[in-house]
Amino acid sequence: MVFINIINGTDINLSVLFFGASVLRKFMSIVIASEKALISQWLDIFKKYAAEFDINPNDIEFWPDVKDKQKVEYLIVWKPPYDISRQMPNAKAIFNLGAGVDHLLLDDSLPADVPIVRVVDENLTKRMGEYVCLHSLHHLREMPVLKKAQANNEWREIYNPTAHEVTVGVMGLGEIGAYCAILLTKLGFNVIGWSNSPKNLENVKSYSGTAELDTFLAQTEILVNILPHTAKTDKLVTYKLLSKLNKNGALQGATYITAGRGKTHHQADLIRALQDGNLKSASLDVFETEPLNADSPLWGLDNVVITPHNASLTDHITVSKQILGQIRNHKNNGVLINVVDLKRGY
Ligand code: NDP
Ligand code: OXD
């Protein structure tokens, strides 16, 4: 709450003035929409910080309790109903409450002229960096082998190479992948990366496009997938692709770590590769279908670590403030940042 001290020294609550004035202005609304019940928590968070961004908290609603759908100017969504933009046809921008927009873009009725904005947030990026480093080290230090030995009360001595003897290949060198790649170099890994366009990252050799994919894979012992799911990355990681990884390096086997999107790998192929030794081990945060089916063979594989799509998290405070700031800026004719390229799909 913001207070000012007027001439006679009496404190006046600015928010009272602000909301009083707002009665006179045209009603507009911001709607948060999701089919996931948990997302309703965001309503209170957005309301809490709204006034800091000159937005009336009472103008923020949670779908489907919307007073006047025609008056909705901004949509904030995470896995919304597929016809959300048809329900609120006057929205001027759609803010996605996460980095990946694949599920949102499944809605083929999205108007091409309404910008879709995704989250790019330092906390989201840093959390993913933690996950990628944790799991790269987990496999470098042969933790699946040690866990199995522990389960059998076995004192198993193994020789570990150091990080600099091992090449980690990062697929996707965007906001998150590039950060993870750099962080891995700081741990000492030899790091290479693959993306659509060439990159210039310190100590990370860059490969790009389909033509350079096999060269990238042939050197990679630990493959880290931070790709978005698009028409081009759909089921990209197959048994055949995994069999191109370097199995004769310091780790004597290939490892797959994925925290981008589950639909970028072929899950049955992945299971086959993990069962027949084509892959030595894996850490999987994302799956073709989430939650992962209780009867998936992946649960029972002792060379696999499964995490429930929590490699990173959308930070409530930083992300709500970022979106409110963007809305204020857009209302004042400013330019939106982190707008998704609809043609590329990410
Ligand atoms: P960006 O859009 O910033 O980066 C995407 C990267 O993928 C870019 O480097 C891009 O190449 C590359 N890429 C896209 N398509 C292809 C292709 N066909 N071939 C080669 N490279 C390709 O995304 P972020 O880094 O912010 O996020 C990546 C993904 O991570 C998100 O889309 C989301 O799905 C996932 N994610 C998962 C989370 C989790 O908790 N598991 C949390 C947050 C995000 P170029 O740079 O040349 O365009
Ligand atoms: C995601 C996210 O895209 O959490 O998975 O941002």
Image: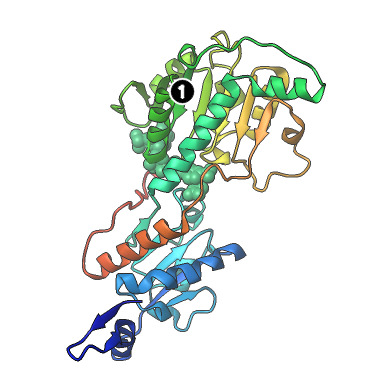
Relative to 221, is 342 on the left or the right? Answer: left
Specify whether residue 345 is in view: no
Query: Which colour scheme appears in the figure?
Result: rainbow
Task: Classify mark 1: helix, strand or loop.
Answer: strand
Taking the spot 33% from the left edge, 53% from the top edge, the residue there is: 339
Mark 1, Cα crowd under 10 Å, few <14 / some 14-19 / many 20+, is many
Q: In the rendered image, which quarter is residue 22 located in?
A: bottom left
Looking at the image, the residue that sits furthest to the right is 152
| Ligand 1 neighbours mark 1 (CB distance < 8 Å) | no
User: Foreground: 33 or 264?
Assistant: 33
Q: Quadrant of the C terminus?
A: top left
Please say whether residue 117 is visible from this viewpoint: yes
Identify the residue at image location x=47%, y=76%.
Answer: 61
> In the depicted view, which residue is nearer to us: 79 or 88?
79
Residue in the picture at 22% in, 88% down = 9
Is residue 288 rendered to the left or right of residue 298? Answer: left
Vertical arrangement, residue 248 with respect to residue 48, above or below: above
Residue 195, x across and y down, in percent: 38, 30
Is residue 51 found left or right of 248 in the rendered image? left
The x and y percentages for residue 169 are 46, 23
Q: Nearer the viewer, residue 111 or 198?
A: 198
Look at the image and tell me in which quarter the N terminus lies. bottom left
Marks counted in the figure total: 1
At label 1, which amino acid type do we have?
Answer: Gly
- Direction from residue 48 to residue 147 in the image, left or right: right
- Residue 145 position (above or below residue 104): above
Instruction: Say which residue appears at 77% left-offset and 32% top-offset.
Output: 300
The location of residue 320, given as percent across then percent down, is 41, 62
Q: Which residue is mark 1?
A: 169
